[in-house]
Image: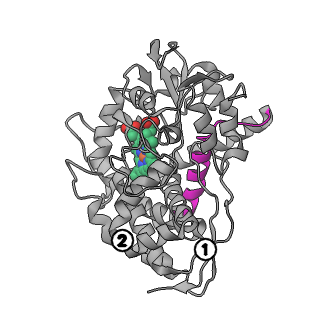
């Protein structure tokens, strides 16, 4: 890389549509200190090793001052204390275990698989809404409303509150991107973020309290009333956890479904294959996760000790950026990494992370995307891209198209 700051190049919107050549350059030096301070790690085995290293912290309170300023995380929010995504053991483990109880095995083993019929129903309804139209934006009319409806139902957010709630969630998701612009613009971004967090926290606190008094069959009620062997979450912890699930259930799956349709529409042979062999959906989604992951990089880790990795000593207190999307294209791990091969064996991509913070929502995200892509390829007739590349969101961390304009001839039943 010629630039002193590959990081600035990654964050540059000009590279958003295709960051993969940049990552290929970076992999020539698996661990590199960026001119702006953080260490960038771009190769598969090194990322995997660091994700499992207890000397690497996810706790934002361990960020050094420059990294905290860069990420806009200088201050703690009293309304929304850190979620388990941003905590280390033992607090991480206690909260993750409690949140997991109503969400999956071993306490609620069929929670997600039992939702298959409901998910298919939402998909059918959204696609039926395309009738009579020949131009669509697959983001606004499908990839966004589908997972957002699902996560709201799962948690028990009333439908009529969803629009308010989307605004907060979008603001918080955008806040994951490093802050940029002039000092005044940066302060304005922080203020918008502060307000969205306060409003969302107040809203969720009200809902948690309501569900505590009259529980229903949803996750918020379970979080508010259930308790594990180590007791219950505090009310603030419940609010933070609910906010985490809502946000995590938003932009990530939206981008996976959109990236999937983009990949299919760019390759009509692939689209035909999925239409003719719906059983391909599961390996197809795994390859999609590897090939074009919604979470491109994890920017917020800090070393708690000097760590030797790939011939470099990363000093204690350094900020680490783990480039998951680059690790997924590492030829030392995946032969022909730039080809999309649904039949690829042993497809252990990094897209849901690895180690103690491995994505909690992966079974849901997988099922949603499998159903979405199977039904879209089956029902859209003559679909083609109206714009390639499509316009991308600014966010480099949660990367995906802002719109996916397509033209269709019609709709099958
Ligand atoms: C395609 C969709 C998704 C992708 C690519 C994705 C990706 C990730 C990644 C990379 C991590 C690890 C973060 C880290 O190590 O710092 C993570 C963690 C997490 N994800 Fe997801 N996610 C997706 C969907 C979801 C959904 C639908 C939910 C909720 C229902 C969810 C909930 C979580 C939670 C709670 C964590 C934190 C786990 C922990 O810290 O122990 N995710 N996700």
Residue lying at 23% horizontally and 58% vertically, measured from the top left: 110
Mark identifier at residue 384: 1
Q: Secondary structure at mark 2?
A: helix
Which residue lies at the image location 63% right of the left edge and 82% below the top edge? 134
Q: Residue at x 37, y 68 (%)?
A: 119
Instruction: List x then y, in percent, for residue 117.
Output: 31, 72
Who is closer to the viewer here, 332 or 264? 332
- In the rendered image, the residue lying farthest to the front is 336
Above or below — where is 39 with respect to 139? Answer: above
Where residue 168 sits in the image (x, y, percent)?
58, 52
Q: Is residue 191 above or below residue 293?
A: above
Mark 1 packing: few (<14 Cα in 10 Å), some, or many (20+)?
A: some
Which residue range is magenta in the image? 162-182
What residue does disc 2 label? Answer: 278
Front residue of this view, candidates 42 and 241? 42
Name the chief secondary structure element in magenta: helix
In which quadrant of the rendered image does the N terminus lie?
A: top right
Give how far across and how far down residue 98 sits, in percent. 29, 41
Q: Is residue 10 visible?
A: yes
């Amino acid at each position: 890389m010629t630039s002193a700051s590959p990081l600035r190049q990654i964050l540059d919107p000009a590279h958003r549509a295709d960051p993969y050549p940049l990552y290929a350059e970076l992999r020539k030096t698996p661990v590199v200190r960026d001119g702006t301070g953080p260490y960038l790690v771009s190769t598969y085995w090194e990322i995997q090793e660091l994700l499992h290293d207890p000397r690497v912290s996810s706790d934002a309170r361990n960020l050094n001052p420059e990294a905290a300023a860069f990420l806009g995380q200088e201050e703690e929010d009293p309304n929304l204390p850190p979620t388990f995504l941003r905590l280390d053991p033992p607090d991480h483990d206690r909260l993750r275990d409690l949140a997991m109880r109503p969400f999956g095995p071993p306490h609620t083993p069929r929670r997600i698989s039992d939702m298959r019929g409901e998910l298919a129903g939402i998909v059918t309804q959204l696609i039926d809404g395309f009738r009579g139209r020949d131009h669509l934006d697959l983001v606004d009319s499908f990839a966004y409303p589908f997972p957002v409806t699902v996560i709201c139902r799962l948690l028990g957010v009333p439908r009529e509150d969803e629009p308010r709630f989307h605004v907060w969630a979008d603001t918080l998701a955008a806040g994951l991107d490093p802050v940029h612009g002039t000092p005044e613009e940066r302060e304005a971004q922080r203020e918008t973020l502060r307000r969205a967090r306060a409003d969302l926290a107040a809203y969720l606190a009200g809902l948690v309290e309501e569900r505590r008094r009259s529980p229903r069959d949803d996750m918020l009620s379970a979080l508010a009333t259930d308790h594990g062997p180590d007791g219950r979450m505090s009310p603030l912890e419940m609010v933070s956890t609910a906010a985490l699930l809502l946000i995590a259930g938003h932009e990530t799956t939206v981008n996976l479904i959109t990236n999937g349709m983009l990949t299919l529409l760019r390759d009509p042979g692939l689209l035909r294959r999925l239409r003719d062999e719906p059983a391909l959906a599961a390996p197809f989604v795994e390859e999609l996760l590897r090939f074009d992951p919604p979470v491109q990089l994890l920017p917020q880790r800090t070393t708690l000790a000097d760590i030797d990795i790939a011939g470099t000593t990363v000093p204690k207190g350094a900020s680490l950026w783990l480039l998951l999307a680059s690790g997924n294209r590492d030829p030392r791990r995946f032969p022909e990494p730039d080809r999309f091969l649904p039949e690829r064996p042993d497809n252990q991509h990094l897209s849901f992370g690895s180690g103690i913070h491995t994505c909690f929502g992966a079974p849901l995200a997988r099922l949603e995307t499998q159903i979405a892509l199977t039904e879209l390829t089956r029902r859209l007739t003559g679909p083609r891209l109206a714009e390639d590349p499509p316009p991308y969101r600014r966010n480099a961390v949660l990367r995906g198209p802002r719109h996916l304009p397509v033209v269709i001839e019609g709709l099958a039943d």
